[in-house]
Amino acid sequence: MSIPQQLPLGVSLRDDATFDNFYLSESDPNRQVVSLLQSFASGENPESVIYIWGEAGSGVSHLLQSACQCAEASGRSFHYIPLADLMATDPAVILDGLEQLDLVCIDDVHLLEGQPQWQTAIFHLYNRVKDGGRQLLMGARQSPRGMDIALADLQSRLHWSLVFHLQTLNDSDKVAALRRRSRLRGFDLPEDVAQYILHRAPRDTRALFLCLEELDRASLMAKRKITIPFVKQVLDI
């Protein structure tokens, strides 16, 4: 059996999906989760299965991709599986041989509801990963107890995982996160502009960061600073 490539065909990791780029406030309840995932992805933590969940835009996908980037930087083999992009594919094609890798990250696990073929395939992969002493990281929008998984054996495996709920940012932290992300991109986003974006654009952090990327590209092309009038023009908000 050949060792699978680290990413399925057509799937890529976001360059900005790193642990360093994940915003954490001083008293952020997510600090423990991020710290654990860093040690887990680097191979320093012997835990075998971790399951993180949170609502859309909470950063679950960011952290799974960050774990992959961390594993690669640590010289470990990995595979990232975004189920949202792969559910129409035969699971055997996607999952075969992954237990040979150090770290397997499965995103969008909530999409397993109503998918018996995928449930069976993930169940067997779970067992192969554990039996082989490898590591599995899963991400979803629901807790294991909140999902309707028909395959009872898989449901119990998910319950046995080390489970963490990723907390969403409050509004003041979202503003701070936007401003920090802008600085990482090489420009300063004034607070009044960040507030304007927050109150008029979709409010989840993923959507806000996509707005920021669009503004960054537009400002470079137009050679203009990012002001409220410029935001109105580019984002039509």
Image (cartoon, rainbow, N blue to C red):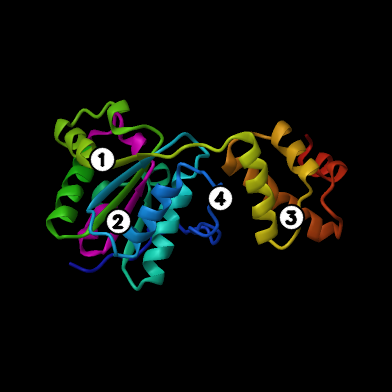
Q: Would residue 228 appear left or right of 76 to someone viewing this image?
A: right
Crowd class of label 1 (few under 14; some 14 to 19; many from 20; radius 10 Å): many
Mark 1 or mark 2: which is in front? 2
Residue that carries the numbered disc 1 in the rendered image: 118
Task: Measure how far apart labels 4 and 2 are at the Cα level.
Answer: 24 Å
| Residue 50, horizontal then vertical, whole percent | 29, 47
Task: Measure how far apart labels 3 and 2 are at the Cα level.
Answer: 33 Å
Residue type at the position of mark 1:
Trp
Residue that carries the numbered disc 3 in the rendered image: 216
Residue that carries the numbered disc 4 in the rendered image: 23
Residue 195 quadrant: top right
Q: Would residue 223 appear left or right of 111 to someone viewing this image?
A: right
Q: Is residue 10 magenta?
A: no
Quadrant housing the C terminus:
top right
Residue 45's tag is none
Cβ–Cβ under 8 Å for marks 1 and 2: no
Residue type at the position of mark 2:
Val
Instruction: Please tell me whether mark 4 sits on a helix, a strand or a loop.
Output: loop
Residue 104's tag is 2
Q: Would residue 23 appear left or right of 121 to someone viewing this image?
A: right
The mark nearer the N terminus, 1 or 4, is 4
Residue type at the position of mark 3:
Asp
Task: Measure how far apart labels 3 and 1 are at the Cα level.
Answer: 39 Å
| Residue 188, horizontal then vertical, whole percent | 76, 56
The magenta-colored residue range is: 94-117
Quadrant housing the N terminus:
bottom left
Residue 26 seen in the current view:
yes
Q: Is residue 105 magenta?
A: yes
